Image (tube, rainbow, N blue to C red):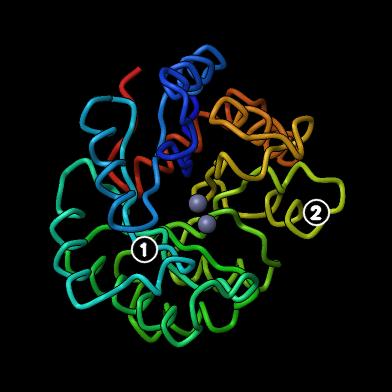
Amino acid sequence: MLVDAHCHLTGSYPEPGALAAALDRARRAGVNGFIAVGTDLADARAVLALAAGRDDVRASLGVHPHEARTWDSGTPDALAALVRDPAVRFVGETGLDWHYDLSPRPVQETVFRAQIRLAREVAKPLMIHTREAPAETLRILKEEGAGAVGGVIHCFSEDRAFAREALDLGFHLSFSGIVTFRKAEAIQEVAAWAPEDRILVETDSPYLAPVPFRGRTNEPAHVTHVAAKVAELRGLTAAALGLITTRNLEALCGWAPSS
Ligand SMILES: [Zn+2]
Ligand SMILES: [Zn+2]
């Protein structure tokens, strides 16, 4: 039992049948649930269509900070209608990315704030993306009252001080393949220390393949390597970690895969 708490399944498998094959490989590896993330309105619709056809896929829909520049006057109502679907378990990914700066920072902030308000309105947890803007991300989460719904700091790659603040706000920490990288000591320390009921694992595939696949295309089956690393850091078996993180996801979003 193991859930990939954050993966991109749309647009990542252009060949016919490739997505189904990747999900089959994941299932054979013991991964039986997937939170599929949509990053703009068109992608959100594609993710929702995918989730509608599979019991083991649920959706996280939002406008990624990279795509914040696409947000216009019609986006709030369109996104609000999509996230009300019962298959949608999270709002996002949303947040700040000051590494790539693909959208202007003030626009990222406005769009982030709007999605926190939407999550509160529909009472669903947030899926947070944050890169090189830790203080600003925490400040906005606090100012907008994000603790009322909580959520996930996805692809956790900050330090222990950030983790402490995010946990205090009611957020879960989701570890990706980065935790398997040799130089990721600070993240490994958080993965070893974080409260057992607040940890998740993910691939963020097709990005960020864990060791021993680093540099190659990632896929949900590889969340087993992330789980094995976090389990090792915490002195648990991989099976125990799978159970713990599946229960944590269920406590957070009300869904766990049935088998
Ligand atoms: Zn992200
Ligand atoms: Zn992502």
154 on left or right of 175: left
At horizontal 41% and vertical 33% (from top left) the residue drawn is: 34
Query: Which image quarter: residue 160?
Result: bottom right
Query: In the rendered image of this protein, does residue 172 appear above or below residue 31?
Result: below
Front in this rendered view, residue 140 or 82: 82
Front in this rendered view, residue 153 or 115: 115
Query: In the rendered image of this protein, does residue 212 appear above or below residue 167?
Result: above
Q: Which mark is residue 83?
A: none
- Real-space Cα separation, disc 2 to disc 1, in angstroms: 28 Å
At horizontal 33% and vertical 32% (from top left) the residue drawn is: 57
Mark 1, residue position: 63
Query: In the rendered image of this protein, does residue 23 appear above or below residue 183?
Result: above
115 on left or right of 102: left
Q: Secondary structure at mark 1?
A: loop
Looking at numbered disc 1 in the image, what kind of residue is underneath it? Val
Determine crowd level at label 1: few under 14, some 14-19, many 20+ residues with C-alpha closer than 10 A: many
In percent of width and height, residue 2 lies at 50, 27
Mark 2, residue position: 184
Query: Which image quarter: residue 123?
Result: bottom left
At horizontal 71% and vertical 48% (from top left) the residue drawn is: 178
232 on left or right of 55: right
At horizontal 79% and vertical 30% (from top left) the residue drawn is: 212
In percent of width and height, residue 99 lies at 65, 72
